Image (spheres, grey):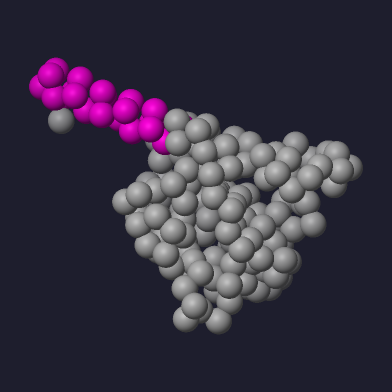
Amino acid sequence: MNDITNINEMNQLEQDHYWMRYALTLADKAEAIGEVPVGAVLVLDNQVIGEGFNQVISLNDPTAHAEVLALRQGGETITNYRILDAVLYITLEPCCMCTGAIVHSRIKRVVYGATDLKTGAANSAFALINDVKHNHQVALSSGVLAEQCSTKISDFFAKRRREKKKNRLNGSI
């Protein structure tokens, strides 16, 4: 996924799909370790400067969301907490915590796949990312590869519910 020549020749929608597919591979890593399958990749000049996948359980860290981990790595990569002109691709709409980190990092754009009607803070449950009270406005694109992103999350939780039901029926908790 690092053929920069081809990426630079793509139009914006093609680039968005390319990087969202990359984020989906990161979401697979989260799922493989029992985490909610969310992936995020931070891109500057069509190069990955940060990436992350949910690790709240494995790191015992409530802030270890995919977005926060990608932003942390991006800041370290460019040695600045202001990550100007970067684009963050996320498989799921960011929550309030992640939205705050996104705004403070001063990234240029957020692209996400699945909407989160319960906790999404871009424009679903809350409209925080572009609140006019912020001193920085982030461009926002939603619904990129939405079906694949939504299916990944839905399938994960359906599997988890089946496992819980099976454990209850077997007398396990």
> Against 161, is 7 above or below?
below
> Against 98, is 32 above or below?
above
Residue 89 left/right relative to 158 = right
**Quadrant location of residue 78?**
bottom right
- What residue lies at 26% left-to-right and 24% top-to-bottom? 163
Residue 39 appears at what percent x and percent y?
54, 44
For the C terminus, the image quarter is top left
Residue 143 appears at what percent x and percent y?
53, 44
Chief SS of the magenta region: helix
Residue 76 appears at what percent x and percent y?
67, 65
- What residue lies at 49% left-to-right and 78% top-to-bottom? 132
Q: Nearer the viewer, residue 94 or 65?
A: 94
Q: Residue furthest top?
A: 170
Within the magenta stretch, is there residue 136?
A: no
Q: Nearer the viewer, residue 22 or 136?
A: 136
Q: Which residues are magenta?
A: 152-172
> Against 1, is 46 above or below?
below
- Observer able to see residue 33: no
> Against 24, is 58 above or below?
below
Q: Nearer the viewer, residue 4 or 150?
A: 150
Within the magenta stretch, is there residue 170?
A: yes
Residue 60 appears at what percent x and percent y?
37, 53
For the N terminus, the image quarter is top right
Residue 165 left/right relative to 150 = left
- What residue lies at 66% left-to-right and 65% top-to-bottom? 108
Q: Nearer the viewer, residue 116 or 78?
A: 116
- Observer able to see residue 3: yes
**Quadrant location of residue 31?**
top left
- What residue lies at 54% left-to-right and 70% top-to-bottom? 103
